[in-house]
Amino acid sequence: MKLRHTLIVTLVIISFTFVGCGKDQASVNIVEPIVLPGGGSEVVTAQNTFGLKLFKELLQQDQDDGNKLISPLSIHMDFCMAYNGASGKTKDEMGRALEVADVPVSLLNSVNNTLINGLPAVDPQVAIHVANSIWYRNTGAQPLPGFIQSIADDYKAQIAGLDFNDPATLKKINSWVSEKTKRKIDKIIDKIDSDDIMYLVNAVYFKGRWKMKFDGKQTKNRAFYKAGNLAVQTPFMTQTAALRYAGNQSMQIVELPYGSGSYSMYIILPGQDLTPESLVSSFDENILKNTLASLDSTVITVYLPKWKSTYEIKDMKPLLWSLGMEEAFSAGNADFSQMYDPGVGAYISKALHKTFIAVDEEGTEAAAVTSIGMTTTSTGMLVMDINRPFLYLIAERQTGSVLFLGEVNDPSK
């Protein structure tokens, strides 16, 4: 019997903790600006476009009324690493799906390297750490040195060849994940199967502070209206402040910045007659970018529910197929000859995504894991009452990189 080999490529967006302080919501204090290489903004745009397209597909394919959350940065960077190993039609399809078909791989890697190095330095009140690692089986089929070196150099990955038959290897990888996620994600691997040959793991840890935290004494239970106008009672935070805001009949958007303002959460509340799904279906990356750029500082009272939720996409393949990434999942047709020798016949067999978020008076904590498995063969005060299903995203303002994109249908869950 021919042995089936599996490569698991895992990306972990680790714990985001935002703690609140400060009153001035308008100013932004960037200590070390992120200087993208020439053409680099196209890569960030590609990341956000891909994330928005994937989120639209998710809302179409998963119509459960629960809360949903993905990390565009996590998923895109994960597939960028796998993209380094692709050739031929497989590379073409992946490039189109990832929106980077016209971007040289060297530029793609350079931008990711710049984000890995630059994101931690942008905001003095935000601590962010990006870590990558490669763990591969030290016997049998070996990854090509050029692929390993590229990921090591451009993604600053820690490289280790280990005995995958030794139980200590599983503990070592999961301990690394637990450490980098501050134990928000205790483990990513349940067991190492005999056909697993590699794990690629990316971890990001973020800790910051709201520019102005919500006063816990003002938090009170209020009604949140789910789909069908079904009311549930849940704690709402509130604050009145000068915030960047825009509103029309279709939606209201408010920016809630963290730290010195380089990172923000944007709450997008659809109009009374719209659902998050119908609103996001009308978005593309340019519309979203221009809408966020149009926000003006306005004194506004915001009511925001506290929420804490987890979300899991157990099989991302249908979503990625919808974006045109098919051959990469096809046994016998996929071409990852830049990752492994062509005779190995590597192809993507599975792709998973898990997320966690908690939002309260002090700030926000969030985590995400992406795993790719590869097998061989009034007239006065404005009021924004966020009391019905809404969208939100967390982004770095200078580059526009979207870290998280989500929908809240029931904050009481």
Image (cartoon, helix red, strand yellow):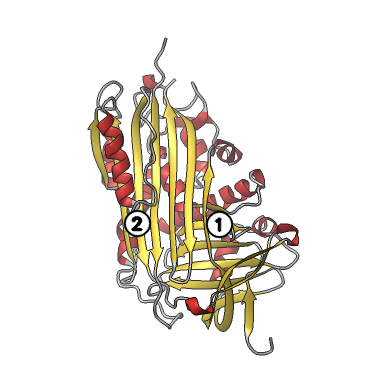
Residue 336, quarter of picture: top left
Residue 367 is situated, as x and y percent measured from the top left of the image, at 43, 53
Q: Quadrant of the C terminus?
A: bottom right
What's the amino acid at mark 2? Tyr
Residue at 69% over, 89% down: 379
Q: The residue tagged with tag 2: helix, strand or loop?
A: strand
Q: Is residue 334 left or right of residue 115?
A: right
Residue 245 is situated, as x and y percent measured from the top left of the image, at 57, 76
Residue highlighted by disc 1:
406
Label 2 packing within 10 angstroms: few (<14), some (14-19), many (20+): many
Is residue 100 at least partly visible in the picture?
Answer: no
Residue highlighted by disc 2:
205
Label 1 packing within 10 angstroms: few (<14), some (14-19), many (20+): many
Depth check: give the residue in front, 171 or 295.
171
Depth check: give the residue in front, 335 or 350.
350
Residue at 54% over, 37% down: 315
Query: Vertical placement of 301 versus 62: above or below?
Result: below
Residue 260, quarter of picture: bottom left
Residue 95 is situated, as x and y percent measured from the top left of the image, at 48, 41
Q: Is residue 206 left or right of residue 214?
A: left
Residue at 65% over, 43% down: 61
Are dots 1 and 2 in contact, CB under 8 Å? no
N-terminal label among 1 and 2: 2
